[in-house]
Amino acid sequence: MAMSSALTDLYRYPIVQAPMAGGASCPQLAATVSEAGGLGFLAAGYKTPEAMYEEIKQLRGLTDRPFGMNLFMPQPPNPDPAAVAAYGERLAGEAAWYETSLGDPESGSDDAYDAKLAVLLDNPVPVVSFTFGCPTRAVLDALAKVGTRTVVTVTSPVEAQTAQWAGADAVCVQGVEAGGHQGTYSNDPAADGMGVGLGLLSLITLVREYVQIPIIAAGGIMRGSQIAAALSAGAVAAQLGTAFLVCPESGANALHKQAMTDPLFGRTELTRAFSGRPARGLVNRFMREHAPYAPAAYPQLHHMTSGLRKAAAKAGDPQGMALWAGQGHRLARELPAARLVETLAVELDAARAALGLQPQRGAVS
């Protein structure tokens, strides 16, 4: 389809490595995925503009293939400072246990968005994606003028329509199965527990009815057969995070990697316990004890718990860490990233062949 051309020349295989903030999506991982024929991504979230630029330079030193950078949208002020303070009091025991202090919840809510945009306009990258909201048309137009293609993360047909109206080149449709933060435009606690999160295949089909721009599918994808299903539903590519998190090139903490297939962590849940925004992770002690009391306050809770999570990792205690993971985490394979891309491509073509379809462009034979 003509509308797919906005993205398909960026990769050999329709496999996108998800931008995972917090260190997992490092230059080595992104470069390896891009070199192998996928589309690697860096994550600017929680980094300074200077650190973001340094990672871009590092990645460009490793590959000349296309890659992407993800930005977090600025967040509105916290509506209930008292709730944040009360949560901080609740976490005082955690701080004492890990012999650290709680972070300042008012450390900033815009993630240096304007400064990072300025860097990306002065030093354009092939793709920029956005999470937690939709940029203005002026921002998207400015990126288009410097040759950057844009993707907006969406979790509903209405959000996808907003992204199309604003001028995005594509949307990343994120099903409720996805690990890490849900990329919703709003952080509405009234929606919690009401079953509003849509499964990926249903969401792709719905979004396809609302927009004409390409769809990247994200959420619980761990096998090539799932990529085939997403493409059949109307996506042009699939984005995988948890699948790449355990690769040796990933910058994720070793404890986080081990937990993906540890029988001790058998299930995932959406929680606000660590950041104040719904995010899917492996259920551990911290989540069980504190999730019911966490207010809808992002990034205030992220800043508050950052030191706790680092101290837990330093102590070798995964029960106090944010173990972000998608619903398919038990299917994680500890393969080098290039081998994983190749394996997924082979599985994708096998699934397509079973359906009597032609192999993907550039398929492994």
Image: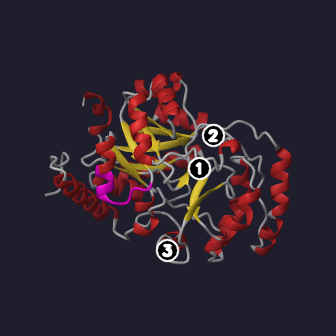
Q: Which residue is drawn at the image coordinates 15% and 46% (left, top)?
A: 358
The x, y position of residue 282, in whole percent, is 57, 66
The structure residue drawn at horizontal position 49% and vertical position 24%, both measured from the top left corner, is 166
Image coordinates of residue 58 in percent, x first then y, are 42, 52
1 and 3 marks in contact (CB < 8 Å): no
Badges 2 and 3: C-beta atoms under 8 Å apart? Answer: no
Tell me if 273 is positioned left or right of 340 in this view.
Answer: right
Marks 2 and 1, how far apart in space? 9 Å
Task: Tell me which label, 1 or 3, sits earlier in the chain.
Answer: 1
Q: What range of the chain is rendered magenta?
A: 220-228
Residue tagged 3:
258
User: Residue 47, which numbered label?
Assistant: 1
Q: Which residue is mark 2?
A: 112
Residue 222 on the magenta span: yes
- Where residue 85 appears, as percent x and y from the top left, is 84, 52
Say if residue 33 shows up in the picture.
yes
Answer with left or right where residue 332 lies relative to residue 81: left
For the image, the number of numbered tags is 3
Mark 1 → mark 3, Cα distance in angstroms? 25 Å
| Depth check, front residue: 5 or 328 | 328
Looking at the rendered structure, the secondary structure element under dot 3 is helix
Tell me the distance, in whole angstroms, between the alpha carbons under discs 2 and 3: 32 Å
Q: Residues within 10 Å of mark 1 (few under 14, many from 20)?
A: some
Q: Give the secondary structure at mark 1.
A: loop
Answer yes or no: do the residues labelled 2 and 1 have beta carbons within 8 Å? no
Instruction: Report the quarter where the N terminus lies.
Output: top left
Of mark 2 and mark 1, the one earlier in the sequence is: 1
Residue 125 visible in image: no
The amino acid sitting under disc 1 is Lys
Image quadrant for the C terminus?
bottom left
